[in-house]
Each structure stands twice: as structure tokens, then as C-alpha cells.
Image (cartoon, coloured by chain):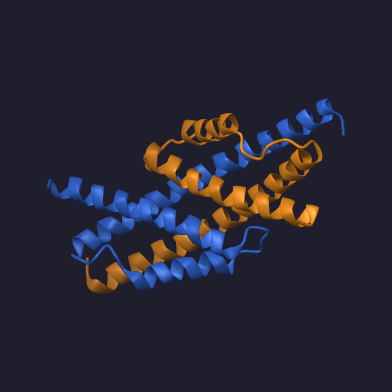
Chain colours: A blue, B orange
């Protein structure tokens, strides 16, 4: 492979990654919208935001659908971050809604 | 909203989230496959894995495509985790390929 060919191959891969990442961002926002809806229901019913059992289900679903090549422990760590961020959104949203 | 209605609403939201999460896992694996391809090109050309400038581009692309409701700093933190995990995959893969 010449240096020119390598550069072209990297550029093509990066363009594909950018496209994949934009799809991931769109799905993260779709997920956030649903989490906000859950927050509204929980707020109305005075239910707790944090439910460890449900978080285990989320991990099981994500890891269970993992066909690789990404290792399952990596999938779990990425979803830990996603869940953490969504929990912040839910808390901020509920504070705004209740005005406190 | 009755307790029954709340439970049904939560179950519906969670089913949607599980579907979104499976799509995210599929995209993460698609991304990993492309990252592995980049690893092969870099290995052949003896290029460094870590390129801070490219990582900045990845963040800029992800945050730039963010239409909310997820805050952009949350998007950035999730992509920091994704990039970290992909870097591990790339390193493990290169070690395997070179037998060291």
C-alpha cells in the first residue's frame, strides 16, 4: 500500500465513522426523549428515578444483542455512561418541571 | 393517571428504549469494524493509533449533529467513552496481528 492509498483508505473509513456517529447521536436523542417521558410519568406518580433492577435489564438487553466485534464488557461500559447521562437529564428535567 | 396506566406507559417506553439500544449496539459494532480496518491500514503503514486531531474531529462531528434534547456535553462524554473503548479494541487487535 502506498502512502497515498493509505491516506485515501483512512479518509474513506473516517467518513463512514462520521456517518455512523451521526446515527448514534440521533438514537441517543430519541432515547433521551423516551427517558423524559418516563420522567414525567414517574414524577406524576411520585416514583423513584433510580431503579437498579431496570438498569440491569438495560445492560442485559444491550449485551444480549451484541454480535461483536465490540466486546460485551465494552458495550456495558458504554451503556453505563449513557445511563448516567440520561439520569442527569431526568433529574434536571424534573427539577425544572417542579420549579425547584 | 392510575397506577395501572402508569405501569403500562412505563412498559411501553421501556420496550421502545430496548429497541433503540439494540440499534445503538449494532451501530457501535459497525463502528468497531471500521476502526479495525483503520487499525490494519495504520499497522501496515506504521502510523500511530492515537491522533488527537482526529479525536477532536469526531467530537465536533457528533456534537455538531446534536439536535437535542441530550445536552452536547453529555454527547461529548458518551463519545469519549466510545472512543476509549475503540482504542482498546484497536490495540488488542494490533497485538494479535503482530503476535506480541
Q: Which of A18 and B81 is in front in this view?
A: B81
- Where residue A41 sits, quadrant-wise, is bottom left
Q: Residue furthest top?
A: A4
- Where residue B23 sits, quadrant-wise, is bottom right
Q: Where is residue B66 in the image (x, y as percent from the top left)?
A: 45, 36
- How many badges with numbers are in the image? 0
Q: Where is residue B78 in the image (x, y as percent from the top left)?
A: 46, 47
Q: Residue furthest right?
A: A1
Rendered position, A87 above or below B74:
below
Q: Position of residue B8 (x, y in %)?
A: 34, 70
Residue shown at 76%/29% (left/top)? A7
Q: Residue furthest left?
A: A100
Residue shown at 66%/61% (left/top)? A68
Rendered-image quadrant of the N terminus of chain A: top right
Rendered position, A21 above or below B2:
above
Residue shown at 56%/33% (left/top)? B52
Residue shown at 31%/49% (left/top)? A89
Q: Nearer the viewer, residue A98 or B51?
A: B51
Rendered position, B88 above or below B52:
below
Amino acid at each position: 500500500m502506498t502512502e497515498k492509498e493509505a491516506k485515501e483508505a483512512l479518509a474513506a473509513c473516517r467518513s463512514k465513522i462520521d456517518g455512523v456517529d451521526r446515527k448514534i447521536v440521533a438514537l441517543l436523542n430519541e432515547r433521551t426523549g423516551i427517558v423524559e417521558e418516563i420522567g414525567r410519568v414517574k414524577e406524576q406518580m411520585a416514583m423513584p428515578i433510580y431503579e437498579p433492577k431496570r438498569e440491569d435489564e438495560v445492560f442485559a438487553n444491550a449485551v444480549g444483542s451484541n454480535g461483536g466485534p465490540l466486546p460485551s464488557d465494552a458495550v456495558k461500559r458504554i451503556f453505563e455512561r449513557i445511563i448516567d447521562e440520561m439520569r442527569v437529564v431526568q433529574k434536571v428535567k424534573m427539577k425544572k418541571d417542579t420549579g425547584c
